Amino acid sequence: MVHMKSIAFLSLVAASASAVPLVLEKRIAQTISASTTKWEQTCLAANGGQACNPLSIKAFSTLLAASGPCEQQDAADDMMDLAKKLNSQQLIVLTQIFTQQPKNTPNSVATPYCQKAPRNSELSGLFQCQFQGANQQSFAGGAKLGDAGTIPFGRNAPLSPPGSCPANPSGPIADGTQLVDLTQSPNAPGGSAGSTGGKTGGAGGTKPVQAPAVSSAAPAPAVTPATPAPTTGTSSAGGFKQANGQAAQGLNAKFAGLTADSPCTAGENACVKGGFAQCVGGKFVVTQCSGGLVCAALPLVNSAGTSITCTTTADAEARIAATGATGGITGSGAAPAPAAAPSTANAPAAGNTNVMVTTGAAPAPAAGDFKQANGKDAQALNAKFAGLTAASSCNPGENACVQGGFAQCVAGKFVITQCAGGLVCAALPLVNSRGTSTTCTTTADAQARIAATGVTGGITGA
């Protein structure tokens, strides 16, 4: 009996020991919107206007685990284009720091490095740090240290120490923290803008091979169906409209591969199997669109960006084609997955990502009439939202603005996603059709949009 107990005990110890790696394989995430909050505030102060928020949103979205290895750098290139256009040294520095912010990882492994040169020479030699909780010997996708993608572009040996980056050469940073809160020195190699020159070797003490400088005036890289096109907020209507169409195609292509079990980050939203999905508690909560409609990303009409809403396949195709983008909804001629079982619930949205939720509305009257009606409807919704709290009763699928953030009703309780810095959640009148949208915007923008419909009384009509 003693012998058997010893065996049982040793088996228990062995089982416990073998379980340790499983405990360590945790999801490492962060509040992604915090990575560009200071950048966006600085951009607005530098008179970047409406170009700031779309770039901020696009940039912090690249920190999600599902993003490709070069999406963060591509977004930083767009940010750098604007920073140089505004001639803001501080904005250049904050862009260089953002380029080095660690990405989320679903299973405690390091994230691969981009293997191409940036468009802007100010970003050459920069790459993301890793979080301390990540295994620096293993990378997403099953690669081991030394394999392709595990060494930053322009280098020929693994980083020393592993997980470091030029802005934090001592090693990885604490899980979930923001590099911009730890340092204001990007330590860009080669003495480029923003470099302090104090640590010119970058991470690991080995001077990196300087990537070839690429003119900032060079055209953006070709957009693949899986990668949204940059939305630079350019003043050229034709430019941002086509970019919006391509960005919508990229999102729809990405959404086509998602399921309810796909890993996600709190506040993330998407289209999943024809329904609108918001990430709550690390899992997508899907609200199916009403009968005959599908969830799709659509290009905005009046500014750079995209929206996610329930619509018809034909409407989505027409809106994207109107921007000049070719290839249908996904850029490859394919349509998104059809809607699942019909539901009467409105499609929800998340406040930090240019999401537009259109309300159910009566058939459109004459153009002048529906615009004013839309303004009044938006005022009524905002007045209603002003009295809501997180404890207010709600119905599954219901969405609203609650205490400045976007709120979705999950299990009878509002789940609130706060808007990015300086923005508030508000109901806005649609411009080209009957209805309203709920999204994050500035108070001034909401007031202007409602006033433009011809109604008086501000955001709430009071």
Image (cartoon, grey):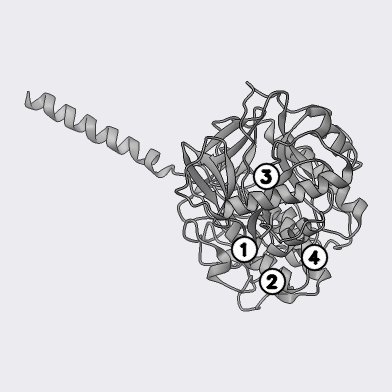
Q: Secondary structure at mark 4?
A: helix
Q: Nearer the viewer, mark 4 or mark 2?
A: 2
Of label 4 and label 2, which has the lower sequence position? 2
Q: Amino acid at mark 4?
A: Leu
Please say whether residue 172 is visible from this viewpoint: yes
Rendered image: mark on residue 421: 1
Q: Amino acid at mark 1?
A: Gly
Q: Nearer the viewer, mark 2 or mark 3?
A: 2
Query: Where is mark 2, residue-wise?
Result: 42
Q: How much space separates mark 4 and mark 2, taking CA atoms?
A: 12 Å
Who is closer to the viewer here, 287 or 57?
A: 287
Query: Where is mark 4, residue-wise?
Result: 82
Residue 66 vertical placement versus 423 (above, below): above
Please say whether residue 332 is visible from this viewpoint: no
Of label 4 and label 3, which has the lower sequence position? 3
The answer to whether 19 appears left or right of 144 in the picture is: left
